[in-house]
Image (cartoon, rainbow, N blue to C red):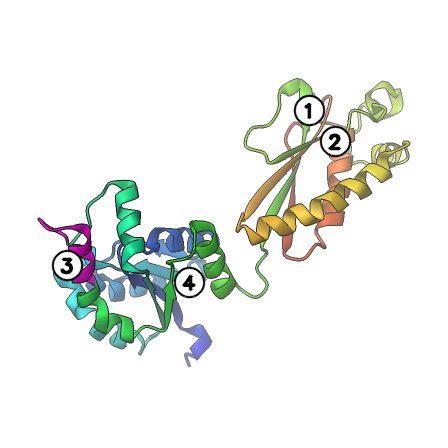
């Protein structure tokens, strides 16, 4: 027996051109939705059936449907009504004031898809008329007139993120400076101020994941103080990332070779920040094993 919770979950994003459909699609992808852009309404049912065969690997799908479908769009409401019989379907309609839409089209120097030989405003008026009935039947209408792309993405995250979904995924990466700074990181911490276990013969062959090295590093003057203060400094930063809808962050912790100090310190910092609200943490030891 199929229950409501077993049915395929689908979100349809539609609305005015220039109102932010691409931003919404990107935000949904970041939340783990499988997103298909510029899909004719007639393809919605085959999409649901296709994804349904994938089982739990694709539990949530989102389709961006807009006026680019032209004649295909006339069947939209009938198709959505039919889909609701077999899937959990919600429809978002994005809109904005005429003056805002005109300004957005002018800023990217692109014509409105319906303006033909007329003005941008002519195209907007034609589109608003064609979509009036669709708007009335939508589950959620979002006016993006006064939202920038980050605020719109945050709005989508707040409404459609799973209750237990992390606001920001943080990767703590240990590395060795002698192998070069890692690329695409948000912050770098240098723990070379601590004595290097490499110069302790009985510790040299071990690494920061081993208890004897970890204990040696953490017992050094300033080690635990650094960890506590650095984690405390990260708390407002990570909270700010969530407000700004920054979904992923990488924090690199470096020592000379990326084998001893940075490995131990990155693990300790990760253990502290994993309990911050909305934060999920993973560890990566970039240079461990290179020596």
* Image-quadrant location for residue 17: bottom left
Mark nearer the viewer, 3 or 1: 3
Tell me: 77 left or right of 233: left
Is residue 173 within the magenta segment? no
Number of numbered callouts drawn: 4
Badge 2 is on which residue?
A: 262
Q: Earlier in the sequence, mark 4 or mark 1?
A: 4
Could you tell me which secondary element the residue under label 2 belongs to? helix
Q: Is residue 193 above or below residue 84?
A: above
Q: Earlier in the sequence, mark 3 or mark 1?
A: 3
Lateral position of residue 167 relative to residue 41, left or right: right
Q: Tell me if residue 117 is in the magenta stretch.
A: yes
Inter-mark Cα distance, 3 to 4: 26 Å
For the residue pair 14 and 142, the one nearer the viewer reads as 142
Q: What residue sits 39% from the left and 51% below the top? A: 23
Residue depicted at 73% across the width and 38% down the height: 266
> What is the magenta range?
115-127
C-alpha distance separating marks 4 and 1: 40 Å
Distance between the Cα atoms at labels 2 and 4?
39 Å
Dot 4 crowding, Cα within 10 Å, few <14, some 14–19, many 20+: many
Q: Is residue 189 above or below residue 57?
A: above
Q: Which residue is mark 3?
A: 70
Mark toward the viewer: 2 or 3: 3
Q: Are marks 1 and 2 in contact (CB under 8 Å)?
A: yes
Determine which residue is flagged by label 1.
176
């Amino acid at each position: 027996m199929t229950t409501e919770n077993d049915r395929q979950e689908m979100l349809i994003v539609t609305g005015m051109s220039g109102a932010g459909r691409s931003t919404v699609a990107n935000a949904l992808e970041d939340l783990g939705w499988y997103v298909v852009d510029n899909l004719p309404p007639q393809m919605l049912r085959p999409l649901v059936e296709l994804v349904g065969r994938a089982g739990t690997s694709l539990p949530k799908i989102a389709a961006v449907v807009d006026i680019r479908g032209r004649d295909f769009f006339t069947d939209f409401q009938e198709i959505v009504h039919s889909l609701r019989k077999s899937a959990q379907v919600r429809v978002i309609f994005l809109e904005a004031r005429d003056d805002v839409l005109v300004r957005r089209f002018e800023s990217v120097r692109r014509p409105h898809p319906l303006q033909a030989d007329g003005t941008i405003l002519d195209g907007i008026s034609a589109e608003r008329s064609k979509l009036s009935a669709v708007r009335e039947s939508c589950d959620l209408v979002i006016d993006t007139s006064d939202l920038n792309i980050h605020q719109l993405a945050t709005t989508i995250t707040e409404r459609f993120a799973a209750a237990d979904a992390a606001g920001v995924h943080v990767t703590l990466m240990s590395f060795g400076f002698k192998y070069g700074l890692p690329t695409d990181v948000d912050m770098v911490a240098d723990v070379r101020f601590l004595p290097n276990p490499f110069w302790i013969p009985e510790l040299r062959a071990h690494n920061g994941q081993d208890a004897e090295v970890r204990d040696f590093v953490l017992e050094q003057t300033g080690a635990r103080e650094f960890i506590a203060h650095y984690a405390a400094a990260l708390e407002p930063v990570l909270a700010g990332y969530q407000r700004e809808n920054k979904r992923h962050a990488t924090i690199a912790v470096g020592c000379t070779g990326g084998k001893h100090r940075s490995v131990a310190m990155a693990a300790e910092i990760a253990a502290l920040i994993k309990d911050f609200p909305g934060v999920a943490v993973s560890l990566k030891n970039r240079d461990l094993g290179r020596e």
